[in-house]
Amino acid sequence: MLEIIGTQQQNTVNQTFSIIMPVSTNREETVHRAIRSLLNQTYPKELFEIQIVIDGHRGDEQPITRQIESYTDERVKIAKVHTLRYERCISRNDGYRAATKDWICNLDSDDEYMTNYLDRMNWAINEFPDYKVF
């Protein structure tokens, strides 16, 4: 079924998405790949945001916050910085609280989305409007 899903189907509602990404301080090597996979989405850029929660920041000894702040794209937002390591569940909850869009997606900082992931999510939501979780 995934092969038949094109990008930006006609007569569909364009949903808005908040992507929640917890980032621990040992993920400096992979987080940029994850963020790039989001910034390269084929979905309209004004319809999604990236809420990042830094988990376990310890001041200057961990440069991950400065690295993420270096992104100039307004979609990349730091929702919260934890000074202690709380793990992903608490970090995701902080990201959920910061989310401003209608739908929430999760992405781990060592993973990435295909470039048409949000297009496919939009298609699924429009195709199956009674579903609440995808």
Image: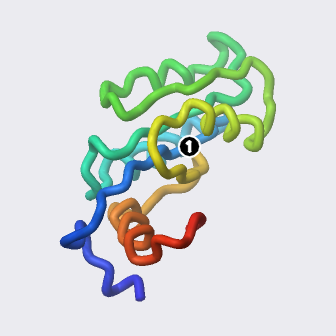
Q: Residues within 10 Å of mark 1 (few under 14, many from 20)?
A: many
Examine the rendered structure and indicate whether residue 132 appears above or below residue 3.
above
Task: Pinpoint residue 66: horizontal percent, then vertical percent.
Answer: 49, 18
Q: Residue furthest top?
A: 60
Task: Pinpoint residue 60: horizontal percent, then vertical percent.
Answer: 62, 11
Of residue 102 and residue 111, the one placed in the foreground of this image is 102
Q: Residue at x 49, y 51 (%)?
A: 103
Relative side of 93 to 5, left or right? right
The residue singled out by tag 1 in the image is 20
Of residue 70 and residue 4, the one placed in the foreground of this image is 4
Q: Residue furthest front?
A: 130
Q: Residue at x 52, y 72 (%)?
A: 130
Query: Which quarter of the image is occupied by the C terminus?
Result: bottom right
Task: Pinpoint residue 121: horizontal percent, then vertical percent.
Answer: 43, 66
Task: Pinpoint residue 3: horizontal percent, then vertical percent.
Answer: 34, 86
Please give the count of numbered marks on the rendered protein: 1
